[in-house]
Amino acid sequence: MPYDVKFIRSSKIKELFKVNKQSIRISADAKDLVYKYLDDKVKEGVEEILNKLPRKTKGDSKGELKRITVFPSDFE
């Protein structure tokens, strides 16, 4: 059963696989593995961003997010 791509556009992946203007092909057997790997990395990246958001440190709501908006300052 083929891997169901969740977070990436499989049609755009080929553009990423280039080294010095030379296209790198992905075999049919490796395609699902590449999609899963990239999906996992996207999920890890989003979790990293979410973990940078400030959280409450006191009271009953300890550990909850203080804000739900990602700002450019979160990447500094």
Image (cartoon, helix red, strand yellow):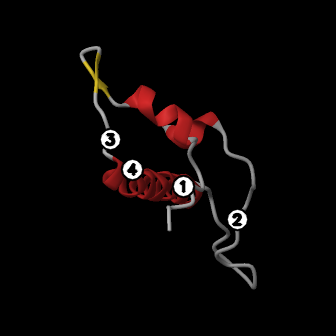
Query: Where's residue 47, x and y in %?
Result: 53, 60
Q: Earlier in the sequence, mark 1 or mark 4?
A: 4
Three-letter residue code for mark 4: Lys
Q: Position of residue 21 (x, y in %)?
A: 29, 14
Badge 1 local density, few (<14 within 10 Å), some, or many (20+)? few
Name the residue tied to disc 2. 65
Separation of marks 2 and 1 at Cα, in angstroms: 10 Å
**What distance separates the C-alpha of mark 3 from that of mark 2?**
41 Å
Q: Are marks 3 and 2 in contact (CB under 8 Å)?
A: no
Q: Depth check: 74 or 8 in front? A: 8
Q: Upstream in the sequence, badge 3 or badge 1?
A: 3
Question: Residue at label 3?
Answer: 26
Image position of 32 (left or right of 30): right
Identify the residue under disc 1.
Answer: 52
Residue 10 in the image: above or below residue 29: above
Q: How many marks?
A: 4
Q: Are marks 1 and 4 in contact (CB under 8 Å)?
A: no
Q: Are marks 2 and 4 in contact (CB under 8 Å)?
A: no
Tell whether label 3 touches label 4 (CB within 8 Å): yes
Residue 71 percent coordinates (x, y): 66, 39
Q: Secondary structure at mark 2?
A: loop
Answer with left or right where residue 24 lies relative to residue 73.
Answer: left
Instruction: Measure the alpha-carbon separation of dots 1 and 4.
Output: 32 Å
What amino acid is found at the position of numbered circle 3 in the picture? Ile
Sequence-wise first label, 4 or 3: 3
Q: Residue at x 75, y 85 (%)?
A: 60
Say what secondary structure mark 4 lies in.
Answer: helix
Q: Report the amino acid beneath label 1.
A: Lys
Residue under label 4: 31
Q: CA distance from mark 4 to mark 3?
A: 6 Å
